[in-house]
Image: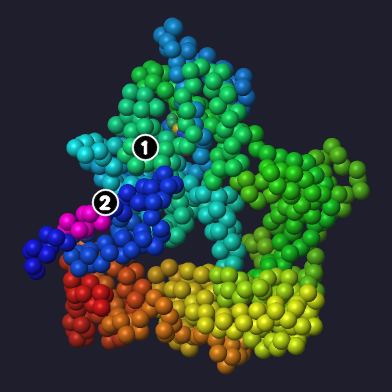
Amino acid sequence: MDDLSKTRAAEKIEDLRTQIRRHEHLYYVLDMPEISDAEYDELVANLRKLESQYPELITRDSPTMRVGGQVAPSFKEVKHITPLLSLGNVFSAEEVRDFASKVHSGLPEGTKVEYVVEPKIDGLACSLIYEKGRFVRAATRGDGTVGEDVTNNVRTIRSIPLTLQLAPGERAPELLDVRGEVYMPRRAFMRLNAERVAAGEPEFANPRNAAAGSLRQLNPQITEKRSLSFFAYAVGLGAQESHAESMEMLAKYGFRVSEGWQKAKNIEEVWQLIEKHEKVRASLAYDTDGVVIKVNTVWQQNMLGATGKDPRWAVAFKFPPEQAETTVEDIILQVGRTGVLTPTAVLTPVRLSGSTISRATLHNEDFIKEKDIRIGDRVVINKAGEIIPEVLWVVFEKRTGREKEFTMPATCPECEWPVVRREGEAASRCTNPHCPALGREGLIHFVSRDAMNIDGCGPAVINQLIAAELVKDPADLYLLQKEQLLNIERMGEKSAENLLAAIEESKKQSFDKLLFALGIRHVGAKVARILALQYGNIDTLRQASAEELSAIRDIGPKIAESVVSYFAVPSNQDLLYRLKKLGLNMEMKGIAGTDTSHPFYGKTLVFTGTMPTLDRATAQTMAQDVGAKVSGSVSKKTDYVVAGAEAGSKLTKAQELGVKVIDETEFMRLLQQ
Ligand code: IVH
């Protein structure tokens, strides 16, 4: 290799990394981007390109290395350097004053105490370790003493710097233990739940649970997709003389620190800040469940110490949850795309947390029984996790005796087929595979934005098309004629033409989108893409066995079973046959992002041993992204074995079978083509 050009490449790489880090900080931490997403993407693409030419120059803290790391069988345990404390709770102004008097009595007489007040973010606590300015490990709180190693997942959180930002000439601390809250912004939470509904998966109850579930993913690539964020709120090891100074230091190092933190000279000022936070919390991009009050000076903190797991120098003031009382006018059943009947309370409309609520989910039969909710009851509702309205309890004192108990009907309200509840399941389902609700909800899903993306075809239009008996299943959409549409109420010449054009346009939608649109249970957008890339076309996919499917990364036995059963149903086979004849796209060929002439396209690769710079998961994803299949075992069908150090039996087998063996450099060279 030409040393001069390598030196130049190294400089260029460092320069790109510095620029990218700066822009990530501007975008994710300061919320003040200076360049467009496209310009940012280009910087990253340039860096990736250089790094792939010089893989030996890749370092673990490069901005390209956020996603990677092995899919682990479980999380390792990590002992915290100093324990992660929890907080005692207070709920009133009086209790806040009590807290202050205890602080004063624990300190030398006449000591001036300053406080810091900051929002209490509803997520989960994490400790981040930096050695010589580099991020090396992250752990969850666990029991406070021992947590779980979530390093690879935390690395995907863009608001967390992988390298501390230092002023010119400034030296990084030997060891820094940053503490803070990993959380999911409200918008990301809503998007995630919408995706889960579309995939027939259960929703997360609130952003906190969603954040916890996403951080504790064994596959960092899933965590990456979840748009988690992080607020730093303390320093374990490496703290300054006061909490405020530590917060300033954290901000300077490039962290997002709890927004709106402020100093208070006395407990009256503390109370004013609490009231201020309570006013703004509804408008924040994330959930808060209170504020944290902290004694600012570190020596005072140390002197006060802790009782058990709660420090005496800090306390959480919890906001009262927003609640409202209203009447259950009716309990109706909604039949979802998967046939599950969800009981929903129809409420007398009531204002709550800035919106009007007229429905609340009752989840299932057991929920209604446990809370003894009846039609006509006065109930107290709140918004769980600030978002989904939920019935908290019945105001039994207000019962008149005229309330009606709810019973799950024996038959489906849509089709009158029997409803069953399988043993061990809370959900009741309609047993009719052709229940009109399934057809309707399935169609609504089929045309939705992330699926076939047919503009101007919302639920109302779908309902009209069904009512007019023009459409029964997705294939019927493609047979619609303009004259038929004109008979539909509120459908003019122009809108009919637009709708037909949008339907026609959707034929070009990529195969993975179509696969997602079919609404196969457990096949969300991401799984659909994996399957589409792996199998390339519908005919190969439908011949795959459950065993073969579940050998694919990210595809579990439940998904595999579901895919196989979908293709086994004759009416599904018929639908696919018709869709194909109508000209829908049933293969990945020619789709942006996959180049069929790529040397790895459609080839089967097996990775073995440890590669010098690439980590296995990253390499596998790169290969899959260009259309390769990654397999775990070597056979005659294997095209390449990518072997690293200490490759064992797979390498031997490849040599026996005469399968081509390549190393990391060759792999990267071919990948670039
Ligand atoms: S300080 C002694 N500050 O609340 C220091 N905690 O209920 C302990 N939390 O485990 C934590 N926002 O996960 C602190 N600004 C904030 C916080 C915060 C959220 C969480 C944290 C803690 C829990 C205690």
Residue 275 appears in which quarter of the rendering?
Answer: top right
Image quarter (top left, top right, bottom left or bottom right) of the C terminus: bottom left
250 or 149, which is in the foreground? 250
What is the x, y in percent for residue 406? Answer: 82, 56
Judge whether 158 appears above or below 93 on screen. below
Q: Tell me which residue sits at (34%, 69%) in the image.
A: 621
> Which is more foreground, mark 1 or mark 2?
2
Which residue is most to the front? 494
Q: Is residue 239 left or right of residue 126?
A: left
What is the x, y in percent for residue 88? Answer: 52, 28
Q: Which mark is residue 18?
A: 2
Residue 202 appears in which quarter of the rendering?
Answer: bottom right
Q: Tell me which residue sits at (32%, 39%) in the image.
A: 253
Judge whether 658 appears above or below 284 on screen. below
As for residue 193 lying within the magenta part, the answer is no
Q: Is residue 364 left or right of residue 258?
A: right
Q: Which residue is mark 1?
A: 251
Q: Amino acid at mark 2?
A: Thr
Q: Is residue 253 left or right of residue 103?
A: left
Judge whether 368 appears above or below 132 on screen. below
Q: Tell me which residue sits at (66%, 79%) in the image.
A: 499
Q: Tell me which residue sits at (18%, 65%) in the image.
A: 54
Q: Is residue 541 left or right of residue 436?
A: left
Q: Residues within 10 Å of mark 2 (few under 14, many from 20)?
A: some
